[in-house]
Image (cartoon, coloured by chain):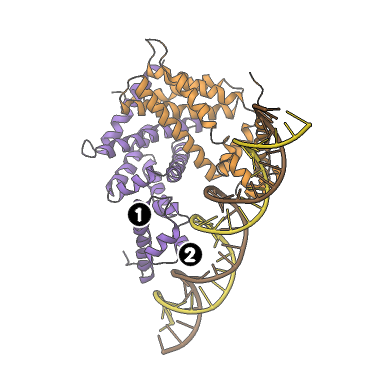
Chain colours: A orange, B purple, C brown, D yellow
Amino acid sequence: MTRPSLRERKAQRTREAIVAAAVELFEEHGYDSTSVAQIAERAEVGTRTFFRYFADKEDVLFGGPDADDEVLTLIRSSLAPAGASDSPLSAAERSARAVLDRLCAQAGLLPARERIVAATPALRARQLLKHDRYVTVIEAELAQRHGLPPERAGLLGRVVFTCAVLAYERWCADPSAAAVGDQLERTLAEAAAVLAPFQA
Amino acid sequence: MTRPSLRERKAQRTREAIVAAAVELFEEHGYDSTSVAQIAERAEVGTRTFFRYFADKEDVLFGGPDADDEVLTLIRSSLAPAGASDSPLSAAERSARAVLDRLCAQAGLLPARERIVAATPALRARQLLKHDRYVTVIEAELAQRHGLPPERAGLLGRVVFTCAVLAYERWCADPSAAAVGDQLERTLAEAAAVLAPFQA
DNA sequence: TGCAAATTGGCACAACGTGTCATGTGGCGT
DNA sequence: ACGCCACATGACACGTTGTGCCAATTTGCA
């Protein structure tokens, strides 16, 4: 691996300085009561520079404009059919497990982030929009790579995604209780049991 | 029923004028390219008055600040246990059916609204946030009135809500195919079948 | 008719976000 | 080591969203 150029390293440090300053200020005074000017000042950059690194004020908590791409490629790769006997359901579960594992792995600065997002409707909306984009990709991938009709792909994708979010929340509530993958399996089983009466 | 006072009727006409002007302009130039000043001008009010009727620019497409309350009370009332043998699942289905019926009944200005929302990420995010608030209420109601543990209430509420959204979309795609209530039942059955392999 | 209360719109203001441009710094070939 | 070119930075001006304040107007009611 080649060491990144001096320019890129400097840019990376600037990014991290901005994020750190933003998280500090958000936890001190709340998201809404913190201005971009304050963040820029603490990070020792101009406000104009802030908007070069992040599309908007919300973006600073979502890892910049290209953070989604990483998750999306992970989704795409883990959702591809593995072998001839791979069912769409097992692919969806495997994919959800992969994303959850990755998500829970870097649990370092998650708590602060989650706390701020939960406390701010605008950020919560942004997060839901991000999830919605994930679901759209999942549906498309399921339909295209597994040959599912769009309606079936939509159903499978959304139900499994819903269970995955729930499993993540359960894991967050008590990370020592069970691995997030086990929480996922448990949640899916519970959902199946709850809906069982509808299976005529 | 008492006839609303002259003041209230006038206010109502102003509201409708603003909404009509906004929808027109949004369809002409798109949401982002339309300024509040333009809306206010076409509705023949001041921009200051616009923000007295709607909390923000997005709100004009979501029926004002108190439109949610109507849906929320409908959710609450239809979600209450009906009789001793009423299961949480059947209550959730009944509630979803009630909201969907109400939603599909006033299908007049729905298409334009849905089109604009679908084309604008900021509005889509707002809609998702609104749905999220619904789910929160559903979960709380399910836990409180039906005595479900929070985890179970969260699962049941979200899964049924997901199916309800899907049923609504299917109904929108072809309103003549089946009543939205039938679509809901069909979707729930399909979800149960899809998840069946997880029922050990 | 006349008074109290509510609605209205204009103004000033803070914050977000973007286009533009002069300045400074890093990368790189000579 | 030098100089050139590309790029990053920050400053300024600008449009838009959203809010507080206040004077003018209109409504409801006695």
The image quadrant of residue A156 is top left
Look at the image and tell me in which quarter the N terminus of chain A lies. top right
In the image, taking residue A186 as reference, residue B187 lies left or right, namely: left
Q: Is residue A171 visible?
A: yes
Dot placed on the residue nearer the N-terminal end, 1 or 2: 1
Chain assignment, label 2: B
**Circle number at residue B23:** 1
Q: Is residue A34 visible?
A: no
Q: Which residue is mark 2?
A: B48
In the image, taking residue B189 as reference, residue A5 lies left or right, namely: right
**Does A131 sit above or below residue B114?**
above
**Toward the viewer: B180 or D30?**
B180
**Around disc 2, counting alpha carbons within 10 Å, would you say few (fewer than 14), some (14 to 19), or many (20 or more)?**
few
Image coords of residue A132 (percent x, y): 44, 35
Image coords of residue C29 (percent x, y): 64, 27
Given the image, on which type of amino acid does mark 1 rest?
Val
**Does B108 sit above or below residue A5?**
below
**Circle number at residue B119:** none
